[in-house]
Amino acid sequence: MNAPKFWMVVPALLVAGAVGLAYAKLPQPPMDDAAKAKAVEAKAKAADAAKMARAQEEKAMDRAVERYKKGKGIKTAAAAAPATKKK
């Protein structure tokens, strides 16, 4: 009983494989100077956006750690440093 269901899937897999194979063989179109410049700009813009997103993520992680430590009653290194005096 499972054999007919299996044979229904085979043509779909063959078509998907053929499309993937045909797409993989298509060459990239050559880029002119304007397209190259635009690609460089887009890459720089994406890098800046990623850097900003990472900075925001780090701030959020720091806030979460501080909130966790405050809730658990753990003193942070910044709060403990002024209490220690060196002679």
Image (cartoon, rainbow, N blue to C red):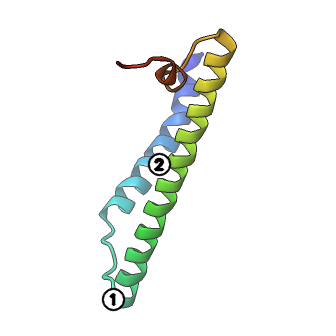
Give the quarter of the image for residue 24. Answer: bottom left
The disc labelled 2 sits on which kind of residue?
Ala
x and y percentages locating residue 74 in the rendered image? 58, 12
Residue nearest the viewer, comparing 14 with 77 = 77
Between circles 2 and 1, the one closer to the viewer is: 1
Q: Residue at x 43, y 61 (%)?
A: 47
Q: Which mark is residue 32?
A: 1
Q: Tag 2's secondary structure?
A: helix
Left or right: 87 with respect to 68?
left
Question: Which residue does the image show at 47% across and 23% down from the upper left?
Answer: 81
Q: Image check: 22 left or right of 49? A: left
Instruction: Specify the label residue 16 is tagged with.
Output: 2
Say what amino acid the circle numbered 1 marks. Answer: Asp
| Callout count | 2
User: Is the residue 36 above or below the residue 20 in the image?
Assistant: below
In which quadrant of the rendered image does the N terminus lie? top right
